[in-house]
Each structure stands twice: as C-alpha cells, then as structure tokens.
Image: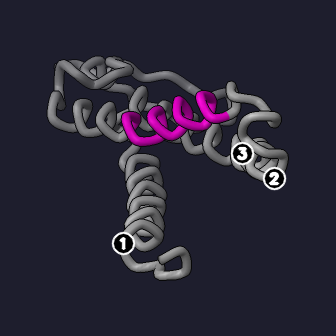
Amino acid sequence: MQSKEASDGCGLLLVRCPSRDNVCGSALYPAQAMACWLLVVFPSALCVGLFLDLAHGAQRLGQASYSSDLRTLPYVLGFLVVALIAALRPRWAWLFWIGWVFSALICAVVVFLTYFWKVFS
C-alpha cells in the first residue's frame, strides 16, 4: 500500500497511510472499536440516572439531594465526553485506558458503598 506524504508547514514531513483514514476503526480493528463503544455504556447510564433524578425536582427529591446532583452533573457529563471521544477514536489507546480507569474507580466506589459501608445499617 502506498502512503501519502504531506508537510505540516513547519518543515516536518508527515506520513499518513490510507488504511488509517478510518475514523471509527471498525474495518481494521472491530474488537477494539466494540470495546470502545462498550465503554460508553456506563457513563451513559450514569447520565440517564442523574437526569431522571433531577427531573423529579427539588420538592420531591429534597433540596440537599437536588443540589448534590447538580454539582455531580458536570463531572458525569465530562466522563461521558471522554468515553465518547474514546469510542470515536479507538486508535487512541491512551484515551481508552483513561476512560477505563475512571470507570473502574467509579465502579469500585459504587461496590464499596453498596456492599461494605455499614453506616446506614
């Protein structure tokens, strides 16, 4: 396969293979693309749950819980953005692993709070 050469304007020579033009990577690495899209499921579920919780309003939910959800919303949306960018660019392995580590940490906190925290029992 022949590669295309281009200059970036600073005198550096950039070499780009035509096979790497696929943005989603599904043609070359279907397992990697699937793993990246599966990474989006967890932050999407967090966003949906948070929006459903906020939809009840402060009167039904309580002002403290509603304010806490509003403070959490930017972090969850940022987490979703990182996961979506990782899904759209599966060749950026470093971004996939950053999203994966965030998911693992959040899952660990949820498991800890659910099964091991004895404050409310």
Q: Position of residue 32 (x, y in %)?
A: 22, 37
- The N terminus sits in image quarter: top left
Q: Is residue 1 magenta?
A: no
Q: Is residue 112 above or below residue 36?
A: below
> Would you say 118 lies left or right of 77 here?
left
First in sequence, mark 1 or 2: give its number. 2
User: Alpha carbon of mark 2 to alpha carbon of mark 3: how far?
Assistant: 9 Å
Looking at the rendered image, the disc whose residue lies closer to the viewer, 2 or 3, is 2
Mark drawn on residue 115 = 1
Report the residue at 70% width, 41% height from top: 73
* SS class, disc 1: helix
What stretch of residues is rendered in magenta?
40-53
Q: Residues within 10 Å of mark 3 (few under 14, many from 20)?
A: some
Asked if disc 3 and disc 1 are in contact, CB closer than 8 Å, the reply is no
Secondary structure state at the residue bearing disc 2: helix
Residue 64's disc number: 2
- Residue where numbered disc 3 is placed: 69
| Foreground disc of the pair 3, 1 | 1
Q: Foreground: 17 or 65? A: 65
Q: Look at label 3 and name its amino acid.
A: Asp
- Tell me the quarter of the picture where residue 37 sits: top left
Res 95 label: none
Q: CA distance from mark 3 to mark 1?
A: 22 Å
Which label's residue is closer to the chain start, 2 or 3?
A: 2
Rate crowding at label 1 as few (under 14), some (14 to 19) or many (20 or more) other CA atoms within 10 Å. few
> Tag 2: residue type?
Ala
Query: Is residue 18 at least partly visible in the picture?
Result: yes
> Which residue: 67% across, 47% down?
75
